[in-house]
Image (cartoon, grey):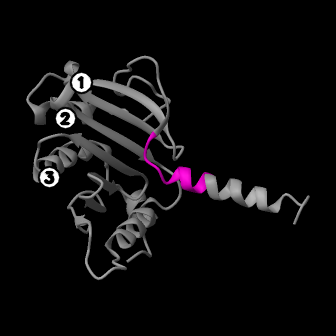
């Protein structure tokens, strides 16, 4: 259909959807901001930074934070400690859009599906946290929800076991998740 603009519009929508599925950042802040000092973003969380510091047995001021908007459009905060091979990096993607519980459930279901004779990546693992949480070993991500928000923590920590990465992700993500009556009501009707 030349001149109608539909193929171009369809391609633009498809491209936007593909980009929103990626987990990178589209813009990094040029200055390091300390957690919870910016009221505009709940992505950087002072308690999460303290939990990371405690887990790593370091001082919180040794962890740098950087706010950004992820390619999904969600606020995110990157927490980094160390340099080179010994660097620990956590990225918290903070989603407060519609149906965070459903988004997590659907993500876990799709990651569990196998369409080939042999599974090539490990399936998600249920984690006890908030109203629902899952660890995605292939992505090194923990997704957790309290019904009102969905926090996706991506762990980059070379040379460390999967079990230890999950333990860090759990300790770090816990301060973001606050189960309330409003959160429970928001998931009512879901399995």
Position of residue 21 measured from the top left corner of the image (x, y, whole percent) = 49, 54
Upstream in the sequence, badge 2 or badge 1? 2
**Residue, far right:** 3
The residue that label 3 is drawn on is 162
Q: Residues within 10 Å of mark 3 (few under 14, many from 20)?
A: some
The residue that label 2 is drawn on is 52
Upstream in the sequence, badge 1 or badge 3? 1
Q: For residue 43, say whether it is visible.
A: no
Q: Does 56 lie within the magenta span?
A: no
Direction from residue 116 to residue 68 in the image, left or right? right
Which mark is nearer the camera, 1 or 3?
3
Numbered disc 2: secondary structure: helix
Q: Residues within 10 Å of mark 1 (few under 14, many from 20)?
A: some
Dot 2 and dot 1 residues touching (CB under 8 Å) = yes
Position of residue 171 measured from the top left corner of the image (x, y, whole percent) = 18, 44
Q: Residues within 10 Å of mark 2 (few under 14, many from 20)?
A: many
Estimate the spatial distance between the alpha carbons at disc 3 and disc 2, rounded to whole Å. Answer: 16 Å
**What residue do we see at 55% from left, 55% from top?**
18
**What residue do we see at 47% from left, 23% from top?**
29
Q: Does 22 lie within the magenta span?
A: yes
Which mark is nearer the camera, 3 or 2?
3
Position of 180 relative to 87 (above/below): below
Numbered disc 1: secondary structure: loop
In the picture, which quadrant includes the N terminus?
Answer: bottom right
The answer to which image quadrant residue 120 occupies is: bottom left
Q: Nearer the viewer, residue 140 or 153?
A: 140
Q: Which residues are magenta?
A: 16-24
The residue that label 1 is drawn on is 63
**Residue, far left:** 57
Direction from residue 83 to residue 18 in the image, left or right? right
């Amino acid at each position: 259909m030349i001149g109608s603009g539909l193929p171009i519009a369809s391609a633009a929508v498809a491209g936007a959807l593909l980009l929103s599925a990626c987990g990178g950042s589209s813009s990094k802040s040029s200055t390091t901001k300390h957690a919870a000092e910016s009221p505009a973003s709940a992505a950087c969380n002072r308690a999460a930074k303290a939990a990371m510091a405690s887990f790593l047995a370091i001082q919180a001021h040794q962890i740098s934070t950087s706010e950004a908007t992820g390619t999904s459009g969600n606020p995110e905060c990157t927490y980094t400690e160390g340099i080179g091979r010994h660097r620990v990096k956590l990225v918290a993607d903070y989603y407060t859009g519609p149906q965070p519980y459903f988004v997590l459930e659907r993500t876990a279901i799709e990651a569990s599906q196998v369409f080939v004779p042999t599974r090539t990546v490990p399936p998600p693992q249920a984690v006890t946290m908030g109203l629902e949480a899952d660890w995605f070993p292939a992505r090194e991500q923990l997704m957790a929800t309290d019904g009102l928000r969905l926090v996706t923590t991506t762990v980059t920590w070379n040379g460390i076991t999967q079990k230890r990465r999950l333990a860090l992700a759990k300790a770090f993500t816990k301060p973001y998740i606050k189960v309330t009556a409003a959160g429970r009501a928001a998931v009512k009707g879901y399995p």
